[in-house]
Amino acid sequence: MSRTNTREEILREAARLFAVVGYKATSLTDIASAVGCSKATLLYHFESKDAIFVALVEPALRQVQDLATRLTPLAAGPAREAAIVGFVDLVLTYRSEIALIYNEILQLLQRPAFAPLKPAVDALVAAFAGRSGDPADEVAAGVVLAGIVTMVVDRIDDAGDLRDSLIRVARRALVTPVPQAED
Amino acid sequence: MSRTNTREEILREAARLFAVVGYKATSLTDIASAVGCSKATLLYHFESKDAIFVALVEPALRQVQDLATRLTPLAAGPAREAAIVGFVDLVLTYRSEIALIYNEILQLLQRPAFAPLKPAVDALVAAFAGRSGDPADEVAAGVVLAGIVTMVVDRIDDAGDLRDSLIRVARRALVTPVPQAED
DNA sequence: GTCTATACAAGGATAGAC
DNA sequence: GTCTATCCTTGTATAGAC
C-alpha cells in the first residue's frame, strides 16, 4: 500500500490506540494493523515504539517550556496569575496528549479488583465538595483529591510538614459555603 | 529452601521491586530471584503476577472504602473536615502502595525525552507558589498543578465550565501573600 | 511446598528481498 | 518505502519429580 503520508497516519493511529488502551498495552502489531502496514514499515519511519510516543507528546512538551520561559521576567504576583491561566489553557489544549500518559494509571485502575474504589472516591469527592452538587465544587474537590495523592507520591520521603501543608491547602481550596442540614 | 512465610517474603520483595522499577518492568523471574525461589513457587502462592499486585494494594483499598463509609452519616460540614483529614492521613499511611500505581507514570516521565520538562515544571511551581520559597507554598502549588492535570484528563470530554472552575480553585488555593518586588 | 524443566505466546526489532 | 520472514528476549504458566 502506497501513501503520501504514512508517517502521519502512523502517528494518528498510534495516538488513537494509546488513548484507548494505553501505551504499554498497544503493540507495534496493533498499530501496524490499524494503519494497514507492517511492523517493519513502522520501524522504518520511527526508530522505535518509544519514538512514536515521544513524537506525539513533543509539541505539548515544548509549550510547557515556552510558558515557563514567558514567566521568567515577570514579578511574583503577575507571574502567579499568568501561570495559573496559562497552565490551565495549556493543559486543556493538550488534554489528549496528557491523557496518553495518564492512561497508564487508568488502565491499572480499571481492573475488577479496583472496581469498589470508584464509589468510595465519589463519596470522598462529594464530601470535599460540601455535598453541594455544584459541578464547580466537584471540580475543586477533584483537584484537591488528585493533587494530594500526587504530592504524597512526589514527596515520598518527606518527614516534615507535608501533612499540615496538605490539610491547609485543602481547606483553602474548598472554602465554599456548606448547605445547612436540619435534624 | 524452606520457609515458614514464603508468601510474606514474596509480597515484601515484590513490593520493593514494583516500587523501584515499576510493575510492568518487574518480571516473575526478578521476584523469584529476589526471594530466592523459583517462578513456579511464586505461582503456587499467587495465581498470577497480577494477583500479587492486588494483594499488595488491597489493604489500602479497604481503608478508602472504610473512610467513605464513616463519612456517610455526617452532615456536610463535618463530613468535609473529616474527609480532608482522613484522606490526607490515609494517603500518607499508604504512600508506598499508591506509589506502586503512580510509578507507571513516573517510568514514562523518566525517559530522556522528558528531561526538559522538569525545570519547566519547577518554574511553574515556583510561580504558583508566588516565589516565596516556603515549602508549604510549594506543596500547595504542587497540589494545584497535579490536580489540574488530573481533572482535565478525568473530564476529557467536558465542554462546559471546566476552565473557569479550574482557574478559580487555583486562585483560592494559592492565596498566600506575594513578596513585593521593587523596580 | 518447592524445585527443574519446559511449553507457549507476544513483544520489539532486524535482515534482506522487492 | 514496504514487505515477509526471522531472531531474540521476556513474561506467564504448567508438568511432574522430590
Image: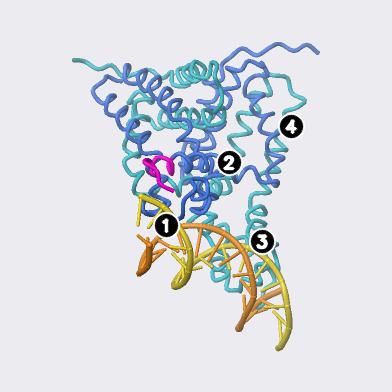
Chain colours: A blue, B cyan, C orange, D yellow
Q: Secondary structure at mark 4?
A: helix
- Within the magenta stretch, is there residue B113? no
List x then y, in percent, for residue B119. 31, 37
- Marks 4 and 1, Cα distance to the nearest angstrom? 56 Å
Residue position for label 2: A106
The image quarter in which residue A20 lies: top right
Q: Disc 1 and disc 3: Cα gap in Å?
A: 33 Å
User: Which numbered mark, 2 or 4, is in the foreground of this view?
Assistant: 2
The residue carrying mark 3 is B48
Quadrant into which the N terminus of chain B falls: bottom right
Q: Residues within 10 Å of mark 3 (few under 14, many from 20)?
A: few
Q: Amino acid at mark 1?
A: Ala
User: SS of the residue at dot 1?
Assistant: helix
Q: Quadrant of residue A83?
A: top left
C-alpha distance separating marks 2 and 4: 26 Å
Lower sequence index among marks 2 and 1:
1
Nearest the viewer among B175 and A111 is: A111
Q: Are discs 2 and 4 both within one chain?
A: no
Label 4, label 3: how far apart the Cα atoms are: 33 Å
Identity of the residue drawn at 31% across and 19% down: B179
Looking at the rendered image, the quarter that the C terminus of chain B falls into is: top left
Q: Work out how far the residue at label 2 is from the one at label 3, CA to CA, in angstroms.
A: 20 Å
| Chain name for mark 2 | A
Q: Which mark is residue B70?
A: 4
Q: Are marks 4 and 1 in contact (CB under 8 Å)?
A: no
Region rendered in magenta = A1-11
Crowdedness near tag 2: few (<14), some (14–19) or many (≥20) residues, C-alpha within 10 Å: some
Badge 1 sits on which subunit? A
Residue A72 in the image: above or below residue B168 = below
Which chain is mark 3 on? B
Q: Which residue is mark 1?
A: A40
Tell me what residue is drawn at x 46 percent, y 54 percent: A38
